[in-house]
Image (cartoon, helix red, strand yellow):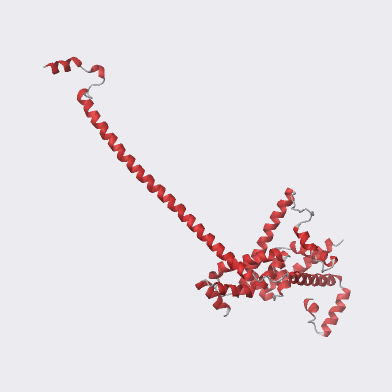
Amino acid sequence: MDEKELVQQVVQHNNHEAFSILVERYKKMVITTCIGFLGNFHDAEDIAQDVFIELYESLPEFRNEAKLSTWIYRIAVNKSLNFLRRKKRETFLQNFIGNRIKGKTGLTIDEIMDKGNTDISIELKEQHKQLRHAMGMLPENQRIALVLSTYHELSYKEIAEVMETSVSSVESLLFRAKNNLRKIMGKTKP
Amino acid sequence: MENYLKGKLDGEVQSEFQDHLLACTKCQENLLVIKSLKEMANEEVSKYTENPFFASRVLSRIDAQKFSNYIDIRTQLLGYASIAAAVIIGLLVGSQLGALGTKVISTNTNAEMLAEEYIPSSTETIYEYDFEEVENLNNK
């Protein structure tokens, strides 16, 4: 069954099996996008579920003018950014109140999760942490272009379609994003 | 730069780029950033192991959401029905009270007619009523 038929089946007949095929087809793409923004797969999988729920609800509005993958990318980007905004607010409040949740070991959940990853060197882990932090400091549109380019290796044209902008804007966004990362990383180096 | 990292540059262009890279610290830093980004992306994505129940979880959440929407609609309808029932009950009680009021008024009217017979309303107060005249009339 091709994509159009699957969409039709879901919209007209509420066919769960057809939607399940769509989920299987696009889940890796969505989870990878979410990981690109969030940096961990635990949150990414939850957000990916939300992405597919929204896809299910918004499929009747899908007009086949754009590719379905472009439509899904847009939902994934929006959901991830919304999650980050919400998390930022919560972190701010937590820091403000001074109530960082720690277990008996005195570690946060993220620290415990990090402890298990002994397969990469501490230096590399630190570098990735800095890079992730630097990515978080980029303006949203630069971050979107960077994630789609790095995690999916999408072409400038494809990124432009997802972001509903021009190819030259994407070029400029990526150029500025990499320059900014270099500057931020340069500042954070000891 | 990305093509260089992917090894997609032609031999001559590649060696030219490498010469430039040795001399330009800005490009070295940029290359390092791009390389680190790619490594980070690969590392983060490789950590993820596919969840075989992903699709079924999504579908069950959709069903749960539909059910909660259904409950919401039912609750809303129930709310509207309660309001309508309250209005109807109010109207019924109102009309019953109205009828009772009419009865009370008619009872009052009878009493008033009886009073009129004994004490005509033309007299301003009971003290002006001429009891003697009435008594004389009765004796006749």
Residue B104: x and y in percent read: 29, 34
Tell how many labels. 0
Q: Give the residue drawn at x 44%, y 50%.
A: B82
Residue A34: x and y in percent read: 69, 67
Query: Is residue A43 visible in this depiction of the protein?
Result: yes
Q: Pick whichever, B135 or A17, lies toward us.
A: A17
Instruction: Tell me the quadrant of the picture where the N terminus of chain B can be found.
Output: bottom right
Q: Pick whichever, B66 or B31, lies toward us.
A: B66
Q: Give the residue drawn at x 22%, y 29%.
A: B113
Q: Is residue A32 above or below residue A108?
A: below
Residue B74: x and y in percent read: 48, 57
Q: Give the residue drawn at x 82%, y 82%.
A: B13
Task: Quadrant for residue A6, please give it.
Answer: bottom right
Q: Is residue B14 above or below residue A14?
A: below
Q: Give the residue drawn at x 33%, y 40%.
A: B97
Query: Is residue A164 visible in this depiction of the protein?
Result: no
Q: Pick whichever, A155 or B85, lies toward us.
A: B85
Residue A124: x and y in percent read: 83, 67
